[in-house]
Image (cartoon, grey):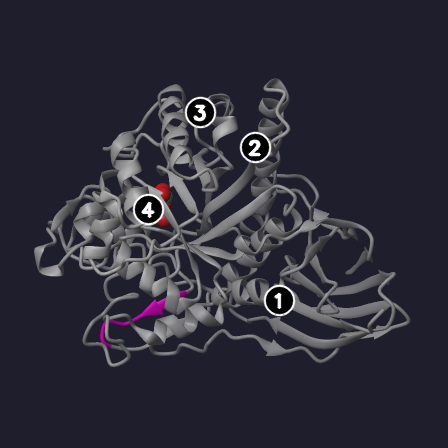
Amino acid sequence: MKASVTAHRDYRIAKIDDRVYGAFLEHLGRAIYTGIYEPGHRSADASGMRTDVIELVRELKVPIVRYPGGNFVSAYNWEDGVGPRDKRPTRLDLAWHTSESNAVGVHEFAQWCGAAGAEMMLAINLGSRGLDEARNFVEYVNAPTGSYWGDLRKKNGHAAPFGVKHWCLGNEMDGPWQVGHKTAHEYGRLANEVAKTLRAFDGSLELIVCGSSNSDMKTYPEWERVVLEHTYESVDHISLHMYFANRTKNTAEYLALNAKLDAYINTIGSTIEVVRVAKRSRKKVTISFDEWNVWYHSNAQDREILGGAKGWPHAPRLLEDIYNFEDVLQVGCILNTFIRRSDVVKIACIAQLVNVIAPIMTEPMGAAWRQTIYYPYYFASVYGRGEALQLAVKSPGYDAEVADAVPYLDVSAVYDEEGGTLTFFAVNRHGGEAIDLEASLHGFGDARIVDHQVMTSANLEAANTLKNPIAVTPAKGKKAKVNDGLLTATLPPYSYQMVRLGLASR
Ligand code: AHR
């Protein structure tokens, strides 16, 4: 089948915010314990952090990491995780029915982020707790010494403020499963008062208020409208979450799901606009899509632990999805959507980063390896920085449950003017036919191919495991060409690719 793309140097959507390639780490399962932290592991540094994992995170150039939850945060006492380790209490985590040793807290996480080259994005408990604990936490983390909380932080080993800019005002407060779940009015009022108070401490903080847990919630999108009515002038971003699943083993339907993601972003972008205009505000609230990923492979395995059938285990194997090749295509399509919606999505966090629905897996006392989805995330994060282009795309398509005329070609393009590159990320959603792609390049001058990476597999279920960590990896593409401003490439059935062009300096 044939598909065409027109890229024009002057047709730009927006600068892609680097924070769109962020990630999430929760005190859940083995994300922290035996994930990033494992004293005694052969690669552990002096503070017990696994450097083999840090290296993989650095390779991904993760700009920002959200922490410590997730559902976990809604019954978390941040104070439990500071001070001498031997005095820290073991608590029961009500979100995941596990035991939390508190061996890792905000100091250890800060140190880990420093080593991983990422900024911290901290979540505040607005489930079981409220305004006072929120302000104490923010002051503990950011206040100068000479104040009560700043001095306590110094006593605990860190005199300099951590300088955390991004703060999430709770997590999924619309969800009945959340400890301290609230109505939109209850939450909106509380979030606004907390935001006001935090701003009184530091007006430059970036505050993220909770939107919907997913677009199937009964309260969506009225939740966002009401919450923004309360908080519009005091917050910067509204948080959205979405997880993707192929429960019915229908690849065509599965790979169409980013149309639903796009509609979700569109609806909340419009809701923001309605509230902005109603408030006669010049301020633009944007979207923090701070949980997204494929999540379903591990559901059956998790039921016993979530039901408490195994007591309160410490760091059990929870939410350990083993990703397959099909998920590479899905994650490629999701990231393309975030690039295309860079006008309104300014932060996004893959959920999560290590072991728990994650691109990086570890074995306790053993190896760390890249899951299949590591690769599309890697390519987008490392090479997808610049400005998103508004492409004109012509591609045959198919009707799916979530949308009509879903194009077989899912594509985004990123122009890095300073670096002199133009990069295409493309997925062929057709399982039986290759796509002969022609992309005409307008206004870019001479272009040459500097990199072409292709991911294909004869088996949609192929996965990287401890035994075979390199079953699914990218390969160099050889056949793409550029002649007289026309890029041609053949995209094999069910494939992901990145084509990177070097541009002659203008
Ligand atoms: O990422 C796993 C869980 O998904 C998070 O704890 C929660 O916020 C969401 O429901």
Q: Nearer the viewer, mark 1 or mark 4?
A: 4
Which of disc 1 and disc 3 is earlier in sequence? 3
Q: Amino acid at mark 4?
A: Ala
Q: Are marks 2 and 3 in contact (CB under 8 Å)?
A: no
Residue 23: x and y in percent read: 44, 56
Judge left or right: residue 433 versus residue 26.
right
Mark 3 sits near ligand 1, with its Cβ under 8 Å away = no
Q: Which residue is mark 1?
A: 383
Where, quadrant-wise, is the N terminus in this rendering? Answer: bottom right
Q: Nearer the viewer, mark 3 or mark 4?
A: 4
How dense is the environment of label 4, judged by Cα within 10 Å: few (below 14), some, or many (20 and up)? many
Towards the viewer: 504 or 320? 504
User: Which residue is at a point 91% across and 71% down the rendered structure image?
Assistant: 484
Which of disc 3 and disc 2 is earlier in sequence? 3
Q: Which residues are magenta?
A: 360-365
Q: Examine the rendering and report whether any part of residue 480 can be seen.
A: yes
Q: Nearer the viewer, mark 3 or mark 1?
A: 1
Which of disc 4 and disc 1 is earlier in sequence? 4
Disc 2/disc 3 C-alpha distance (Å): 13 Å
Disc 1/disc 4 C-alpha distance (Å): 36 Å
- Give me the disc on residue 268: 2
